[in-house]
Amino acid sequence: MWDQLPELILTQIFGHLNRADRVSVGQVCRSWNRTLSSPVLWRSFTVLIDRELRGDFPLAGELAAKYGQHMRSLELAFSRPYILPRQMRITRNTQAEAGAEFLAIVRAKDVQLRQLILTNWMFGYKWGNRGMLFCALANFLRGQRNLEILSLLNADFGVTDVLRLLGTVVKGSGEHLVSLDLRGAFREWQAPHDNPRYLRLLSRFHALSLLKLDYPALSNHALNALANGALMLKSLYISVRDSDSRQHMIADAAWHNLVLACPDLIVSYTIVNISHYEDMYYLLLPSVPLAKFYMFSGHVWDQSRSRNFRSTINLLINQYTNTLVEVMLQLRNNRELLDDLLVSMLIHCKRLTRLQYDGIIRNFETLREICQLQAERKTCFRMIHVKPRNINIQNRAVLNDINYQYDRKMHEQGVDFRVEDPTSILFFY
C-alpha cells in the first residue's frame, strides 16, 4: 500500500520535512527510499555549524556525502554568533573543525553551487581554530565555477579576509556572479571603501546586477569602480547605521557617472538609528536614482537640536518625485507636524506604490485626504491599513464617517482598506 503512492506526490511531501524526518520516512519502504534520492530534495541545504555538526558522524555530513552532488544552494550559519566564556571557546574550536570537515566533504563531491550564503559568522573576535574553518571555506570557493549569488551577511570578517574570499570568487565565478551581499561582512569601523584591492575586485564582477553593502564600503572610488566594470548593475542596496564610519562623503558627480554607466540602476537606502536631517542630507543627492527609502529613527537622539523630519521628507519629495516607489518612515516619539507632507508625497511622487508610516498623525482628516486621492485614482495603492495608537469618541466618529464615504469606492477598486482597533485583534472596518 505504501509503495503505491506516486513519486511526484512523495517528493512534494518530503520537501516539507526536515533532514532527520526525511531519513526516517525513507526507511518505510524501498519506494520511499528511492524517492529520498530525488535531486530536487537536496537542491537547497542549510547547516547550522554550531548545532548540526556535533558528534563523530553528524547527519548533515552523512547526507552531504550521499546527496551532495545535487546541491545548488548552501547556507552555512551560526545560531549563536556572540562571544562566549573562555570554557565555551573549546567548543567553538570543535565546531570549527567540524565545519572544515563538512566543507571538505562537499568539496570532494565537486559540488557546483549557484548560491552560497554565510549568515552570522562569529569572526569579530579571535578564537583558536577559526583560521582552519576560514581556509576550508576559501579552498571550497576556489573550486566554484558557476556561483551566481554570494551573501556574507553579518559575517563580521576583517577586510583582508573578505578580500581574500572575493578574490577567490572573482577568479572562479567573476563572470557569473549576479548578486553580492556585503552587509555586515566587514567588522565595524573597518572601512574598506578606498582599499585599492577592494576597488579592483568590485570592477571585475562584470555580471553583477544586485549589490548590497554598508555605507563604509561605499565611496567615490567604489562607485567609479562599479561604473567601469559592473555595467549590468540594476539594484544597489545601501545600509547606513549610526555606528558606521561616516566621515567620508560621496560626491554627486560619482553618482551621476554611475547612472550614466548603469541607466537602469535603482538605489535603496535603509537608515537605522539616525534621526537628524544634518546627519543624512548628504546621502540624498540629486543624481541618486532613489527608489526605496527606509528610515528607522530609533529611541535615542541628540535632544539639544531638532531632528527636523520635515526637511528630510521635503528633500525626498523634491529630489525623487519621479523615482520613489517605496517609503517606510518609523518616526516614533516624533512631535513634528508631518500630515501635510505625507499627503504631498502621495500627490507628487507618482510612482509611489507603498508608504508605511509609523508616527503621529495630528488630524484624522489626513486619512480622509488619502482616501480621496485613492478614490480619484491619483494614487494606485492596493492596500490602505491604519492602526491608531488610541481611539477616542471624536476620532471614532471621524473614522465612521470616512468608512461610510469611501468603503464602497475602495471595494470597487479592489483596495484592501482597514482600520485596526488598538484595543482588539479584530478590525472594525
Image (cartoon, grey):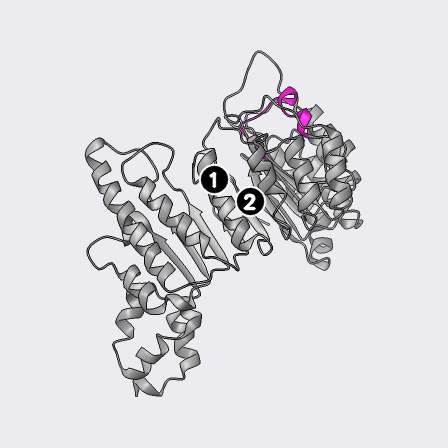
Give the position of the N terminus as an image quadrant: bottom left
Residue 327 appearing in the image: no
Instruction: State the image coordinates of residue 93 (x, y, percent, origin top left).
Output: 25, 42
Q: Position of residue 385 (x, y in %)?
A: 61, 46
Q: Which mark is residue 278?
A: none
Residue type at mark 2: give it. Answer: Glu
Depth check, front residue: 20 or 88: 88
Question: For residue 337, which quarter of the picture?
Answer: top right
Q: What's under tag 1, amino acid-wise?
A: Val
User: SS of the residue at dot 2?
Assistant: loop
Q: Nearer the viewer, residue 261 or 25?
A: 261
**Horizontal placement of 415 versus 187: left or right?**
right
Q: Residue at x 42, y 63 (%)?
A: 111
Residue 150 drawn in magenta? no
184 shown above or below 25 = above
Residue 420: mark in rendering: 2
**Residue contact between numbered discs 1 and 2, judged by CB atoms under 8 Å:** no
Q: Tell me the residue at 47%/44% (across/down).
A: 165
Q: Is residue 274 magenta?
A: yes
Circle nearer the N terminus (1, 2): 1
Q: Quadrant of residue 110?
A: bottom left
The range drawn in magenta is 270-283
In the rendered structure, find residue 162 and report the number of the disc placed on it.
Answer: 1
When asked about the image quadrant of residue 369, the answer is top right
Q: In x, y percent, where is residue 49?
A: 32, 49
Residue sitting nearer the eye, 166 or 223 = 166
